[in-house]
Image (tube, grey):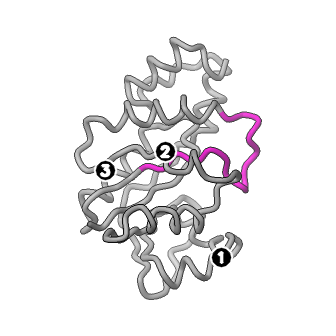
Amino acid sequence: MRIGLFFGSFNPVHIGHLIIAQYIQQFSDLDEVWMVVSPQNPFKQSKSLLPERQRFYMVQEAVEEIEGVKASDVEFGLPKPSYTVLTLTHLKGLYPDDQFELIMGADNRNNLSKWRNGEFIIENYPIWVYPRKGEERTELPAGTHWVDAPVMELSSTFIRKAIQNKKDVRFMLHPKTWEYIEHNNFFR
């Protein structure tokens, strides 16, 4: 099976994430897309992150009705911060018959050389790149594909700030995500 790995903090997961995941699952030849909840991204501050299990729960609830898209907590048992190369090695050990491919925005692809073992990832794993505002569509190496997914200008940071400022963002989130955030009074 060919599985696309869409990594993120998903703090919280929003409609933009879901649109990208479903688009790639439907318009690529991947069998599944796994939204991998990262406990701690080495490039981001962790002080504003909800606990990993709460973020995973929101992703799980948001994708339960999207065929071919699943939530994954595979990084929860790995050392922190989360390094993609270690996760890929771990997954290959768990699922030796499956092929794992990465899904990332153009901003991350353009910074992949700064990642731990970034060149190894580029050389050994196919990458699906979706457009991001302000990022140029550059020539990509073999094994890397541009995806003409919708450009999403929505971010989890925007969602959190809007909630802090008492703005109504319910239509930017899956209904179950919105209910969970409201019920638990997150980001206020």
Counting other residues with Cα less than 10 Å from the Cα at mark 1, is it few (<14), some (14-19), or many (20 or more)? Answer: some
Please identify, in this view, whether the residue under mark 3 or under mark 2 is nearer the observer.
2
- Report the front residue among 95 and 102: 95
Which residue has dot 3 on it?
A: 22
- On residue 73, which mark appears? 2
Question: First in sequence: mark 3 or mark 2?
Answer: 3
Quadrant housing the N terminus: bottom left
Task: Judge whether 23 appears above or below 101 on screen.
Answer: above
Residue 100 position by quadrant: bottom left
What is the three-letter code of the residue carrying label 2? Asp
Helix, strand or loop under label 1? loop
Question: Is residue 86 rendered magenta in the image?
Answer: no
Q: Position of residue 78 (x, y in %)?
A: 61, 52
Question: First in sequence: mark 1 or mark 2?
Answer: 2
- Give the magenta-colored segment's residue range: 35-49
Which residue has dot 1 on it?
A: 117
Left or right for 64, reference 87: left
Q: Residue at x 72, y 34 (%)?
A: 48
Report the magenta stretch's main SS: loop
Do the CB atoms of the residues marked 3 and 2 lie less than 8 Å apart? Answer: no
Helix, strand or loop under label 3? helix
Q: How far apart, in angstroms, are the residues tagged by discs 1 and 2? A: 22 Å
